[in-house]
Image (cartoon, helix red, strand yellow):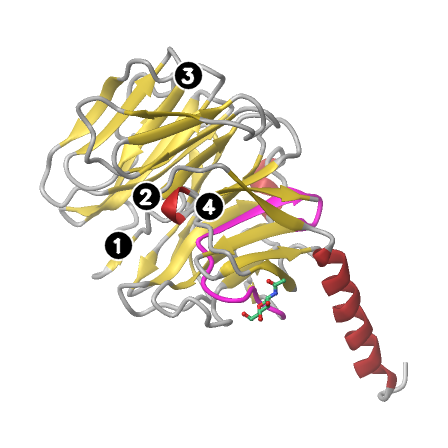
Amino acid sequence: MSRKTIPYFVYALLLFNSLAARAQKVIELEGRAGVSIRGLSVVNDRLLWVSGSQGTVGRSTNGGASFNWLTVKGHEKRDFRDIEAFDAVTAVIMAVDSPGIILRTFDGGASWQEVYRDSRSGIFLDAMSFYKDKAGVVIGDPVEGQFVLLQTGDGGRTWHKPAVAGSNPPVEGEAFFAASGSNIQALKKGRYLYASGGTRSRLFTPGAVFDLPLLQGGSTTGANSLAIRFPNRKNGGKYWVVAGGDFTKDTVRSGNIAITRNGGLNWTPASVPPFGYRSSVAFIRGQKMISCGISGVDISRDGGISWTNISTTGYHVCQRAKKGRAVYLAGGNGRIGKLVW
Ligand SMILES: *[C@@H]1O[C@H](CO)[C@@H](O)[C@H](O)[C@H]1NC(C)=O
């Protein structure tokens, strides 16, 4: 290829990517005005649960055409930043701030049992992830010099501290964002990846800790979300994508995506990054990905290397169905969206 043709080739590729991405759009569903939604759990194409501020939980059994909304009794002021649903009647929700609590329902949200409580000062649970509906993990900001980690082996009925905790202490000012419930991902029982932010942004893996090439150094910077390319392969195929940035500079297009294909040894920033800070990132099929944040929604067709924006409407969280292909989004002012793709 001659030097001269390279720019045209790149231009054509970008144009093609952009046209291909435009075929995809987010349609807005009926949401819940006044509630900030950051918890999203898409069980299958028709069944999804959401959770958020003011003790709110919503559930749709018809692909988002309508939602049943409820306020968790006795927890009307709590912000449920993450939810994991297993079917139409069973789900676990996690509240941020103090006391740290985890609740579970087995009757579609009619009643909730408190399955965990931590009243230590400074407790702040951030995110939750499950492997095959039974093995779950929760991370929280450091208390007494250690990250908070909790595990369950029975689908969230009981929680305990992992056998080996605190081998990787945080640095001063390093914590987690409770932005989308996706900065921790369970790889299998007892093995998980989680990504920090603040003064440092690092990825913690079962064997090692890696520095991430994301914006960091302040209290609003760092990793917010983590996506695994091959959830059924050992260590997710070692292909992981981390999203973040600085939520106070939500349109800055740098330091917001990092990709590794070898389990964290080497990291590549996106060559055409998403249009700003991104609080959530997910693989949707093959190399196709979605990311979202308060400044909009982007699509990648090449495993996170280049991104095209498809909307400037903000969402906090995006996720593909655990069993299915539907992709839903949720965000501020109770907004709920569905990706048409
Ligand atoms: C992509 O982002 C730019 C800059 O914010 C904006 O002008 C444009 O309308 C966006 N495109 C879409 C499809 O939303």
Residue 206 makes an appearance in the image:
no
| Badge 4 amino acid | Val
Circle nearer the N terminus (3, 2): 2
Query: Which element is circle 4 on?
Result: strand
- In the rendered structure, which disc, 1 or 3, sits on the residue that comes first in sequence? 3
The reply, left or right, for residue 282 in relation to residue 5 is left
From this viewpoint, which residue is outermost toward the top? Answer: 107
Locate residue 128: give its quadrant.
Answer: top left
Q: Quadrant of the N terminus?
A: bottom right
**Three-letter code, disc 2:** Gly
Image mark count? 4
**What's the residue type where badge 3 is placed?**
Thr
Q: Which mark is residue 34?
A: 2
Task: Say if residue 261 shows up in the picture.
Answer: yes
Ranked by sequence position, the earlier of labels 4 and 2 is 2
Which segment is the magenta one? 272-288
> Residue 168 or 193: which is nearer the viewer?
193
- Residue at label 4? 317
Question: Was residue 282 drawn as part of the magenta stretch in this picture?
Answer: yes
Disc sitting over residue 170 in the figure: 1
Residue ID for mark 3: 90
Residue type at mark 1 is: Pro
Query: Which one is closest to the eye, mark 4 or mark 2?
Result: 2
